[in-house]
Every structure is written in C-alpha cells, then in structure tokens.
Image (cartoon, helix red, strand yellow):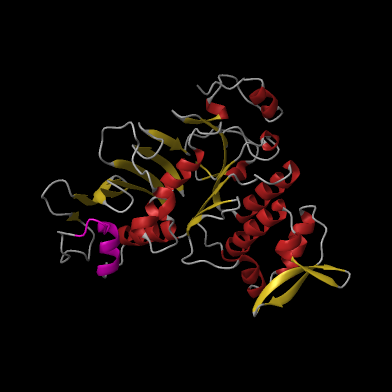
Amino acid sequence: MLRKFKVSNFKSFEKDFELDLTNVNGYEFNKDSIKDGIINNAIVYGHNGVGKSNLALAIFDIIEHLTDKQRNEIVYKNYLNAYCNSKVACFYYEFLINSKVVVYEYKKADYKTIVYERFQIDGIEFVLYDRTKKNNAIISFKGAETLKTDIENNQLSILKYVKNNTQLEHNEVNATFLSFFTFIEQMLYFRSLLDTTYIGFDAGSKIILEDIVKNKNVKNFEKFLNQAGIECNLTEVEELGRKTIAFNFKGKLLPFYKVASTGTIALSLFYFWYQGFKKSSKVSFLFIDEFDAFYHHTLSTLIVKKLKETGVQFILTTHNTSIMTNDLLRPDCYFEMTKEDIRSLSKSTQKELREAHNIEKMYKAGSFNVE
C-alpha cells in the first residue's frame, strides 16, 4: 500500500507537496476504508487548476523507469516547475510492502533522465546511487555482490538494473524488494474523460468493447449498466471482422458507440478496467482522475461502492460533493487540495466530527479551513 508521497519541482509543484495517507482518525464507522493504519479509499476535491491531475502524474512518474508498462510521455512535457531554480524534480514514496515500510526516493532532470536513487526497507539502506557524484552505486542486497556498480546509462534505474540482472538470495529483504516491483507494476491510473488516457498496469492498448466480449462479460456489463440506471439489452455482434457490442432494441441492433451517451461511454471505460481488477485482484493501487465527470451523483455513489468491494487502494478526484458523506467513507478519507497542500477534512477543523454530521453541508458552509 502507498503510505506517503512527496514531490517538488515537478509541473505545478514548486515546493514540497506531501500526501500523507497514514494520518487517520479513530472513527468507529466505515472501518473498511482504512487498512493497516493507512487510508485505503480517498476522494480528493479542489478548485480547477490546483494540480489534482498533476498529483496523479507525479505519483505515476515511477512507472516510466521501473516498469515496462503503459506510459504516456506526452502528458509529461513541461516536466520541471517553471518557477523553481533546481534542475531536478524530487520524488519520495513510502509504501507498506510485506508488513515492512519501504522508502524509495529519486530525482530526475526530465521524464527519462535519472539523477539520484535511494531505496530503504524498515530504515535500512540497500541502494544509493547519486549520479551527480563520481561514486559508484552502493548495492547491499544479498546475491548482488558481483554486479557492476557504475551504470553509464542515465535512463536506466539502478533498482531495475538490480532486479533484471541478479539471482537474489531467498530472504525476507529480497522478497520485499521483488514485492515492491510487483506493486509498482500493478499500479493503474486512468482518466474518466474522452481521451481515455491511462498509465501503468498493462502494456499496449486494447479495444474496450472487444475486450469485454473476449472476457465473456457482455451480460455482466449489461447487468452493470442496468444497475447504474441505464436500461438496456446488449448483444455480441461482429463488425469489420471484430467482436463488439450492440444495443438490442427488440431485435434491431444498433452499434454501442453510435447510441450510447457520453456518460454510458465513460461507464464502459470504467467497466473495462473494473472487470480486470475485480476478477484477478491484480491492481495494487488505483487513481482515477475526474472519475465521475459524466455521471449523475447516484451513479457516482455506486462506482465508489463497487470500488470499495474490490478492496483495492484507490484515490479518486471529483468536484461532486454529493458523495461527501459519512454513509460512504469518513472525514479522514475526503481530502481538499490547494496549490500549497492537501489535507483530509478531519485535519482541517478543530471540531470533533461524528458519524451523524452532514460533512457536505459543513464543507459548503466553509467549516473546513484548508488555506
């Protein structure tokens, strides 16, 4: 699980910007939103332009140099903050992996160029490589003693180099190191907007409806849409040699995308990913930007409940305050983001919040000091 994340000099983040998912309260309701003292379900609010989308890109920057999963280099243009004098962006991640606290820090000059890396497990340093100095990398894993420690390729992560070029001994530390990589490789980010941008988890692109057909989920998708209030009958059809989905209006078949509303298309994108991590539980961490941009508020609630059922750790961004309720999550799971920081509602007031409180009403009344 992701415990903490900190970034500076990246896009809109000039100074240290920290997201702390360990800052929880002792609420006795919706306990399933917290796991091992870490927020498992988070919803982030904030005015347009505060950097919610950039926060997602910052967290998923790690995908580029540690995995071979899906990347989107275009969205990482204008990499460094325009106001900062530093020539590198700094990233700090803190995870809970195999019941151990794993810290990974790195600095990059651009999306590809790695300047510095440091890796720790439970406070013990196992990798340190500062490319600004002429020192070789320090690698302390058992089984990596004969590895070359001077890596000329500044686009190659020293961690990825260790993973791909060693037969590490079987011990608890090395198992945690490999589990760390598994976690990173199974992170997923996507936008619930028309550009269908995604980063991580899978490599390459798939056709949404064709994939639903391939997984034999047409009727389950139909059930999902009906549950979401979209009454429909779906049928598998073939179009231009590909399997796809059509609406069946009493025997008259109409192509899905020709008839579906924007909201229904957004739901098909969500279901495309949902079928995967519901079935395999392989997604380790999920970030959906503007997750309910095209949804009615009742549908937004349904999506959050569906995600909670999977058990996956997730962060959603939204402007929809109707889902800001203790019936769904709890005050330490709702975050308000400004350009300077991000804080949960429970940490934005001195008032003791209870389950019966209408936190949406309080939020709209300005009861939470987030400045």
User: Viewed as shown, does residue 92 lie left or right of 202?
Assistant: left
Q: Residue furthest right?
A: 250
User: Which residue is depicted at the point 57% across and 66% down?
Assistant: 280
User: Which residue is depicted at the point 49% across and 32% down?
Assistant: 50
Question: What span is in magenta?
Answer: 153-165
Q: x%, y% of residue 297?
A: 73, 41
Kindly tell me whether residue 166 is visible in this rendering. Answer: no
Predominant secondary structure in magenta?
A: helix
User: Viewed as shown, does residue 226 lie left or right of 364?
Assistant: right
Vertical placement of residue 296 versus 67, above or below: above
Q: Is residue 164 magenta?
A: yes
Q: Residue furthest left?
A: 134
Between residues 127 and 204, which one lies in front from this camera angle? 204
Q: Can you tell which quarter of the image residue 179 is in?
A: bottom left
User: Viewed as shown, does residue 225 lie left or right of 363?
Assistant: right
Between residues 62 and 290, which one lies in front from this camera angle? 290
Vertical placement of residue 164 versus 42, above or below: below
Q: x%, y% of residue 96?
A: 42, 49
User: Viewed as shown, does residue 367 lie left or right of 172?
Assistant: right
Q: Residue furthest bottom?
A: 241
